[in-house]
Amino acid sequence: MGLGTRVNSKPGAAHPGAPAPVEADLGVRPVRQPGVLPQSARTSRPAWLGFDIPLVLVIISLIVFGVLMVYSASADFSFRIYKDSTHVFLRQMRWLALGSAVLIFLTFMDYHWLRKLAIPMMAVTLLMLAWVLIVQEERYGAARSLYSGSIQPSELAKLALIIYLSIWLYNRRDQIREIRLWILPLGLILGAVGGLILLQPDLSAVITIVILGSLMIFLAGGGGKQLFIVLGLGAIVGLILVRSDLFPTGPDRLESYFAGLKDPQLYSDHVRQSLEAFIRGRWFGVGIGMSQTKLLGLPFPHTDSVFAVVGEELGVLGASSLVILYVILVWRGLVIARSAPDKLGALLASGLSAWLATEALINMAVMVGLLPFAGNALPFISAGGSSLIMALAAVGIILNVSRLSSKQKSGEEHSSHAVVDLRRRDRRRRVSRPVHPSGSSSK
């Protein structure tokens, strides 16, 4: 009988002294069900598949999109200011390289270490915000940056605040429904950060911080009452500040905004030129590098107004594609938050995703006249080292949560399979050796 021949006998028909039949010994391979991977294939899956692949693809698309638009929008500005049409673009590429290194580091660093780094990070942020006020390096009528505009501590403040609030709310997750226990400490945290930014002055960054604080309360489990209290207080304080002497341009921005809602011709020059860019772009755009508004006085075409350049050069189709990428980014961030290993990971992933979406929403809404003018950068698209590095750092933390979640699930599956393998492996009873009657002898 050959090894490939199947034994045609019923179970139990073998000689009592013979070992249990094993299919592998007879050359018979186990039957594999369609669509089911063998155990070896499931456990030997490459480690990089632990990342959220759709999120990685979206970030790569946004980065490529941003690099292309920075080069297109900044060429004329770079030549006029620096006598080199690639100056801003090359500087952005250097920031991209640094930001990519930060992203990789945070992706592979366990996010639980942030619990030890949150307070030092917040302390450094407050010191940098205070240093801005001391140095008074004024650019475009405000002192908001250090080292000739290379570093904007307000961007670091947004990231540090989300990390700090995530840990702070995680430690007080049982008190989130008791407003009196956290409203004062939260007000002090937001007030310290927002107050220093307010003195620069940078109203748009302060508004973003108030929105983020409210969102974090909601994501931590707070109900509508808690959310409306924080938003209501923030709105009252914001209206008072806009009307104050700290922001002499605040009343003008509000008046032009409300007037523009009635008649687009009454919008500010910035918003009118942005709308003209979208009108020129129509559905499919005039082509990369062919924008006219960036040459005819559109303010900050490669930073605050880059979305207008996108609308003119790529049309409604290109602008809509960019919006869809941000929607997918938020969706994947919330999916990662839902499957996070713990509440801290969920708060970090959802909070950072909400921050990136808020920045994008404000920037794009301002450019089409849906919100009063604010100077928020468009994440991954606007030129600027601080904005790009902080956005990439946020993505690194989100991917870290995704990686640890996948690793935890993989460990649980491996542990479950190991228990099964250790218990009678093939689930057959062990065959006892033949016992000879006492007194008998084998011949």
Image: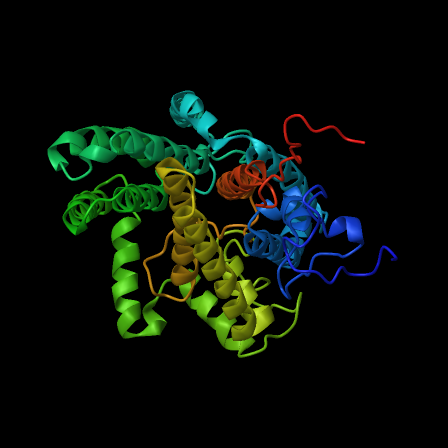
Is any atom of residue 396 visible in this view? no
Tell me where residue 392 appears, x and y as whole percent: 55, 42
Instruction: Give the colour scheme shown.
Output: rainbow
Is any atom of residue 168 visible in this view? yes
Residue at the image position 57 percent from the left and 62 percent from the top: 294
Extreme bottom residue here?
A: 283
Left or right: where does residue 3 sit relative to residue 12?
Answer: right
Vertical relation: 141 (above or below) 366: above
Tell me where residue 212 appears, x and y as whole percent: 32, 44
Residue at the image position 63 percent from the left and 27 percent from the top: 438
Vertical relation: 129 (above or below) 4: above
Q: Looking at the rendering, in which quadrant would you find the N terminus?
A: bottom right
Residue at the image position 45 percent from the left and 38 percent from the top: 155
Extreme left residue here?
A: 180
Q: Looking at the rendering, in which quadrant would you find the C terminus?
A: top right
Vertical relation: 379 (above or below) 111: below
Tell me where residue 41 appears, x and y as whole percent: 68, 50
Left or right: where does residue 17 sit relative to residue 171?
Answer: right
Extreme front residue here?
A: 439
Tell me where residue 101 appears, x and y as whole percent: 64, 35
Location of residue 420 (image quadrant): top right
Location of residue 165 (image quadrant): top left
Residue at the image position 68 percent from the left and 47 percent from the top: 40
Foreground residue, 115 or 123? Answer: 115
Extreme right residue here?
A: 2
Left or right: where does residue 263 sit relative to residue 56?
Answer: left
Foreground residue, 186 or 125? Answer: 186
